[in-house]
Amino acid sequence: ALGQEGAGIIDAVTPKAAEMGLKVGDRVAYNSFFSYAEYTAVPAAKILPVPDGVPLDIATALVVQGMTAHYLTSSAHAGLIQPGEWCLIHGTGGGTCQWAAQMAKIQGYKVIGTVSKGKKSIAEATGCDELIVLDEMDGTS
């Protein structure tokens, strides 16, 4: 199935979706199969509202990046790291790792982020406890 994340404007809702607060005209993002289609039916439980100021293409990217970061910080390494312990997140200047660094902080981890010099200001905004700028280190340029 091509495409697993998308965003758009709701064209029709089922009675159950309406009970969940969804309505025609809502701007939404989702994770569901066949998202490359012009129209697709998406289970209401897989729909996220998109605020008016957020472009739909950005919302689409956030769905997959956010899910990946959540999986990595909550499920993939469950029990291997505890709040208060250190974790290393490589590439905190990129989309998924920006989310992962912030999610790790919310879960109480101490976060070391790595980043290239060109994305340092982006990575600084993630709240990492320590930041390693790879191309400022001896022997890495």
Image (spheres, rainbow, N blue to C red):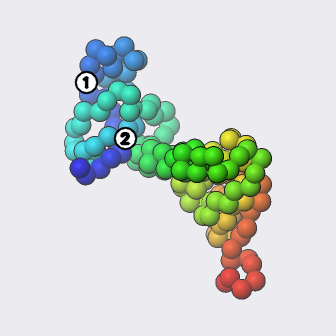
Q: Residues within 10 Å of mark 2 (few under 14, many from 20)?
A: many
Check disc 2 and report the residue beneath it. 31
Q: Residue at x 67, y 60 (%)?
A: 88
Q: Is residue 127 above or below residue 45?
A: below
Q: Is residue 44 above or below residue 116?
A: above
Residue 131 visible in the picture: yes
Q: Residue at x 36, y 45 (%)?
A: 5
Comparing 11 with 95, the one in front is 95
Q: How many marks?
A: 2
- Left or right of 118? Residue 21 is left
Residue 36 is situated, as x and y percent measured from the top left of the image, at 26, 48
Q: Quadrant where the C terminus lies?
A: bottom right
Q: Residue at x 41, y 45 (%)?
A: 60
- Left or right of 61? Residue 108 is right
Check disc 1 and report the residue beneath it. 12
Comparing 73 with 129, the one in front is 73
- Dot 1: what SS? loop
The quarter of the displayed image where residue 59 is located: top left
Residue at the far bottom: name it: 139
